[in-house]
Amino acid sequence: MTTNIPALSELEWPDKAPPSAMPCTECPLRPLPLFVKHTPEELELVQSLKRRSLRMEANETLIHEGQDDAPLYTLLQGWAFRFKTLSDGRRQILSFLLSGDFIGVQQKMGDAAAHGVTTLTSVSLCVFPRDALWEIHRRSPTMGFNVTWLTAHEESLVDDSLLSVGQRTAEERLASALVLLFKRAAALQSDLGKSGVVWPLTQQHLADALGLSLTHTNKTMRKLEKRGFHEIKDGRLYLRNVKALARLADLYGDGHPPSRPLV
């Protein structure tokens, strides 16, 4: 089952400017504490490089595996995921993408995309040409560093997923995923997750991300819920005991996402 989520989970787009026409200075993401503040010159640079806005529905492919002309995207609204597949159709989800994530930077200029990106929900995106990376580094070293940081942060998320698949038990894998994804989604809400967060993931998505069978995922999720760690109700995830779930996952830190730049 897929879910169409409200803009920015809980925030509303300004009535005077729909996402398709919204200037970077009026983006509702930028005032959120999660994102670092940019100078007027940096915002002007981003605005000058932006080519258009794009809306897509759930279960649409944003970037195909092997595609050699994919642009860059900033995800403004909704959820998506990066994945790789084997020749027989088996899929590994590499990471989940939420509002504010910069998509496509892992692909070298002119090279074929090593992974695909598919939407989990309806999404809104800002579209940039691939050569925007050169312009960002050339015209603003600080923004260039920000892009490097975003790439490194994405790698750290993949590293944690690899740790889960390689070493954590099924309970620990699911506990880690629940905490990290909940914290990332909660940081985009004004109440920081007190009312739960929108949860568009199916158990198949979790299984494909964590290297578990669907049956094992189902049994383990029910076990964690019975122990009072979490509840999924009406398309929302509620964590009832975040600290205990983080201890079970053996997470380093509390799982709260660090402040980050927004391209």
Image (spheres, rainbow, N blue to C red):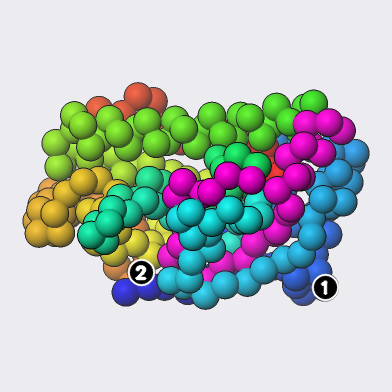
Task: Tell me the amino acid under the disc marked 2.
Answer: Gly
Residue at label 2?
235
As measured in the structure, the alpha-carbon distance from the residue carrying label 2 to the one carrying label 1 is 29 Å
Residue 37 sits in quarter: top right
Q: Can you tell which mark lies on residue 16?
A: 1
Q: Residues within 10 Å of mark 1 (few under 14, many from 20)?
A: few
Q: Residue at x 41, y 46 (%)?
A: 95
Determine whether 202 is above or below 228 in the image: below
Q: Residues within 10 Å of mark 2 (few under 14, many from 20)?
A: some
In front of the other: 155 or 68:
68
Q: Judge from the rendering whether residue 164 lies leftward or rightward of residue 258; answer left or right.
A: left
Residue 245 sits in quarter: top left
Q: Is residue 124 inside the magenta stretch?
A: yes
Task: Tell me the amino acid under the disc marked 1.
Answer: Lys
The image shows residue 1 at horizontal and vertical percentages of 32, 74
What quarter of the picture does the C terminus occupy? top right
The image shows residue 99 at horizontal and vertical percentages of 57, 54
Determine whether 173 is above or below 7 in the image: above
The image shows residue 18 at horizontal and vertical percentages of 75, 72
Determine whether 191 is above or below 246 in the image: below
Residue numbers of the magenta segment: 110-139
